[in-house]
Amino acid sequence: MQSDYRIGQGLDIHRFQRGRKLILGGVEIPHHSGLLGHSDADALLHALMNAILGAIGKGDIGVHFPDTDPRYKNIASGVLLRQVIAMMKKSGFALVNGDITVLAQEPRLAPFFSAMRKKIARLMQVDENQINIKAGTTEKLGALGKGEGIMATAVVLLRKSP
Ligand code: MG
């Protein structure tokens, strides 16, 4: 049965490396290390894209933007998000809302939530109140708790476009 609503969830994780810029939610955050990856390693946008692709039944970002492809080397993930949004629209769906959680022992991300929401809303051409971002630590448990990297998860609800 075809539904007017689709749900998707996404997850991404990247390790820190010194000497790289930390980009999360399309926003540069001052920190001694950035995330290591083929693209800008924006784990937050990657989780969001995986959620959208999941909702429209189109796999994940690894399928569409393989890290073996030199076109995606150091690419800003916002550029990839625009492409994912184009795929979503082509599939006939629009965002109802997205809820994103970031797990990081450090740095403190709350001061950047507003800028991230603005950036994501602009990239997705939706209202800021359709995007929620929150963050937590892992209470110093495990690799994330040792500050070795950052994990993000996202859930999105899509509705069939009129
Ligand atoms: Mg990633």
Image (cartoon, rainbow, N blue to C red):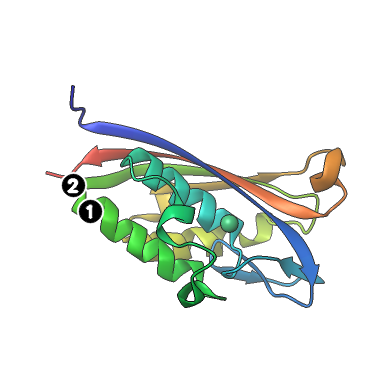
Question: Looking at the picture, does residue 86 appear above or below residue 102?
Answer: below
User: The residue under label 1 is which amino acid type?
Assistant: Lys
Q: Where the N terminus falls, by quadrant?
A: top left
Q: Position of residue 52 (x, y in %)?
A: 38, 46
Q: Residue at x 53, y 67 (%)?
A: 68
Q: Of helix, strand and loop, which one carries label 1?
A: helix
Q: Position of residue 13 (x, y in %)?
A: 65, 50
Where's ligand 1: which quadrant?
A: bottom right
Q: Position of residue 156 (x, y in %)?
A: 41, 40
Q: Residue furthest left?
A: 162
Q: Of helix, strand and loop, which one carries label 2?
A: loop
For label 1, count other residues whose C-alpha is less than 10 Å away and answer few (under 14), some (14-19) or many (20+). Answer: some
Residue 20 appears in which quarter of the rendering?
A: bottom right
Q: Is residue 160 left or right of residue 146?
A: left
Residue 40 appears in which quarter of the rendering?
A: bottom right
Q: Residue furthest front?
A: 68
Q: Residue at x 79, y 39 (%)?
A: 138
Q: Position of residue 37 (x, y in %)?
A: 64, 65
Question: Looking at the picture, does residue 118 appear above or below residue 127?
Answer: below
Front-most of residues 38 and 141: 38
Q: Residue at x 28, y 55 (%)?
A: 87
Q: CA distance from mark 1 to mark 2?
A: 5 Å
Q: Residue furthest top?
A: 1
Do residues under tags 1 and 2 come within 8 Å of each other at their CB atoms? yes
User: The residue under label 2 is which amino acid type?
Assistant: Gly
Q: Which residue is mark 1?
A: 89
Question: Looking at the picture, does residue 70 appear above or below residue 92?
Answer: below
Q: Is residue 30 left or right of residue 11?
A: right
Q: Residue at x 41, y 49 (%)?
A: 129
Q: Is residue 153 left or right of residue 30?
A: left
Q: Which residue is mark 2?
A: 92
